[in-house]
Image (cartoon, rainbow, N blue to C red):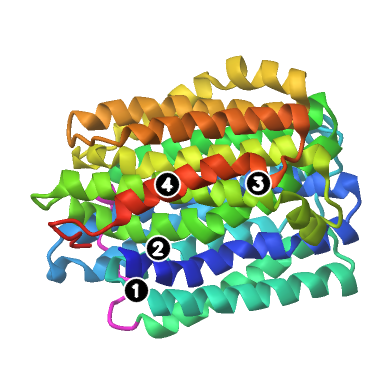
């Protein structure tokens, strides 16, 4: 587990930093209205990517761990063909939406140019994601890293050229992303040669889709919170508020790149194997403890560095965005810790629990986010999303306890309460002095040491 996390930190974490490294280009080359439009289009493409994948990343890992070697060769090809067809259809629908002057007027934005880029963006995204999923299943971390590095270098270079030299604006950012995807796909296809990538096994379609679709719908509902917030901010507060939401989310991607995404990649490739072991509960409890503490350390560190991070990547300290940044990080933290705390539910052969949990999140959206948005604008929207992620996380943790009980340390509850209070304080003070963060940082460090120290039965992962 530790080795895989370190490998994905270098590869997938580095790729996730692409959006952050592009932020200086976005804030200097685009107007506030263009940044707002970019925020809205990015929200839609995030949902489109989730729909296009149909949850096949999760289904692929599940079936890969259970199928005999003789039944695996056609698994990747079948997943690629299903996802590609869905991606083209989804990209076309997005092009119709963002090309409609009537629809975009509702949000104070202009229609997007070069709409043909959106189907290509969806297609490249799902192909790259499934190739990396294959590498996760085989634990070929180094090759996954080469895909990520190739993607990142071309993505940044091409985006800069398209925006600054070709003057393409927002479409130039998506064109650069497509170029990066193309390089990653070529690297992946050139190295994954032992399987018939484009084999078609119709008997595998139904198991893949039936397992993955509930997870896809669950993720779609979860990501819908962020997307709905951006559209409502544009409609109720102004298009610039949607741009502020984008800027804070881009800086907060450091949490995902340095911790959350590498963890999800490593843990996702191992969790199904761990659940089949006799010591599954001990493994989950240990991973959950480390994740709770490690995530809190990262969150407090990023809060301490907030003014410098915004100065570096957004061109100004932006103390006005400190509450928005804090609650965006807190929301990501709740999503991070929910994964190991609810992992026992993966023992259920169907994934309807994920859909129900995320449907609950969507039902809570207006009662939580609506009033908070009117109260505190973009920061209120982020606070409402964080509250929803906390509630839904507690629900699935309680359900998972029936299948694979865990016993978190009492200090973990104190740590969670302290993080919530800390983020609430930013609504009053803005950026917090570093010494405000020291008690929670120390508690998190102590809990991490307690959770990660060697025990009599070593962690087999």
How many other residues sit within 10 Å of disc 4, few (<14), some (14-19) or many (≥20)?
many
Residue at position x 12%, y 50% from top? 279
The answer to whether residue 210 of the structure is visible from this angle is yes
- Dot 3 falls on a residue whose secondary structure is helix
The answer to whether residue 204 of the structure is visible from this angle is no
Q: Are marks 4 and 2 in contact (CB under 8 Å)?
A: no
- Dot 4 falls on a residue whose secondary structure is helix
N-term mark: 3 or 4: 4
The residue segment tinted magenta is 193-208
Q: Are marks 2 and 1 in contact (CB under 8 Å)?
A: yes
| Foreground label between 3 and 2 | 3
Measured Cα–Cα span from mark 3 to mark 4: 16 Å
Q: In the image, is residue 168 above or below residue 408?
A: below
Is residue 230 on the magenta stretch?
no
Measured Cα–Cα span from mark 2 to mark 1: 8 Å
The residue beneath circle 1 is 197
N-term mark: 4 or 1: 1
| Foreground label between 1 and 3 | 3
The residue beneath circle 4 is 293
Residue at position x 36%, y 50% from top? 290
How many other residues sit within 10 Å of disc 1, few (<14), some (14-19) or many (≥20)?
some
Measured Cα–Cα span from mark 4 to mark 1: 41 Å
- Dot 2 falls on a residue whose secondary structure is helix
The residue beneath circle 3 is 303
Residue at position x 62%, y 60% from top? 121
N-term mark: 4 or 2: 2
Q: Which quadrant of the view contains residue 191?
A: bottom left
The residue beneath circle 2 is 80
Q: Is residue 431 left or right of residue 249?
A: right
- Dot 1 falls on a residue whose secondary structure is loop
N-term mark: 1 or 3: 1
């Amino acid at each position: 587990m530790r080795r895989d996390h370190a490998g994905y930190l270098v590869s997938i974490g580095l790729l996730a930093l692409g959006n952050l490294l592009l932020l200086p280009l976005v804030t200097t080359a685009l107007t506030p209205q263009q940044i707002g439009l970019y925020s809205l289009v990015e929200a839609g493409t995030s949902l489109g990517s989730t729909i296009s994948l149909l949850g096949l990343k999760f289904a692929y890992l599940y079936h890969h761990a259970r199928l005999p070697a003789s039944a695996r060769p056609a698994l990747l090809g079948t997943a690629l063909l299903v996802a590609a067809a869905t991606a083209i259809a989804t990209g076309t629908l997005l092009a119709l939406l963002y090309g409609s002057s009537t629809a975009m007027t509702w949000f104070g934005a202009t229609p997007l140019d070069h709409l043909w880029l959106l189907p290509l963006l969806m297609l490249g995204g799902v192909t790259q994601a499934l190739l990396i999923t294959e590498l996760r299943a085989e634990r070929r971390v180094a090759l996954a890293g080469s895909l990520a590095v190739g993607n990142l270098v071309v993505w940044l270079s091409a985006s800069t050229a398209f925006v600054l030299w070709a003057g393409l604006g927002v479409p130039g950012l998506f064109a650069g992303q497509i170029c990066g995807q193309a390089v990653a796909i070529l690297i992946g296809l050139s190295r994954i040669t032992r399987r018939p990538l484009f084999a078609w096994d119709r008997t595998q379609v139904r198991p893949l889709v039936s397992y993955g679709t509930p997870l896809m719908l669950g993720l779609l509902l979860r990501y819908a919170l962020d997307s709905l917030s951006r559209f409502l901010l544009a409609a109720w507060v102004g298009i610039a508020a949607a741009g502020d939401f984008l800027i804070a989310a881009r800086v907060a991607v450091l949490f995902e790149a340095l911790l959350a995404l590498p963890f999800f990649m490593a843990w996702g490739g191992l969790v199904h194997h761990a659940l089949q072991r006799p010591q599954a509960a001990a493994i989950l409890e240990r991973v959950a403890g480390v994740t709770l503490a490690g995530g809190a350390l990262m969150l407090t560190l990023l809060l301490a560095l907030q003014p410098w991070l915004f100065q570096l990547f957004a061109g100004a300290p932006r103390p006005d965005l400190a509450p928005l940044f804090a609650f965006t990080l807190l929301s990501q933290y709740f999503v991070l810790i929910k994964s190991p705390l609810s992992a026992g539910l993966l023992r259920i052969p169907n994934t309807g629990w994920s859909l129900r949990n995320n449907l609950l999140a969507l039902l809570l959206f207006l009662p939580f986010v609506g009033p908070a948005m009117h109260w505190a604008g973009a920061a209120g929207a982020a606070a409402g999303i964080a509250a929803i992620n906390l509630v839904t996380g507690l629900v699935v943790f309680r359900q998972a306890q029936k299948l694979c009980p865990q016993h978190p340390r009492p200090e973990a509850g104190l740590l969670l309460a302290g993080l919530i209070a800390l983020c609430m304080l930013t609504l009053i003070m803005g950026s917090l002095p570093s010494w405000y963060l020291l008690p929670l940082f120390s508690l998190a460090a102590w809990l991490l040491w307690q959770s990660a120290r060697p025990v009599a039965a070593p962690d087999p992962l």
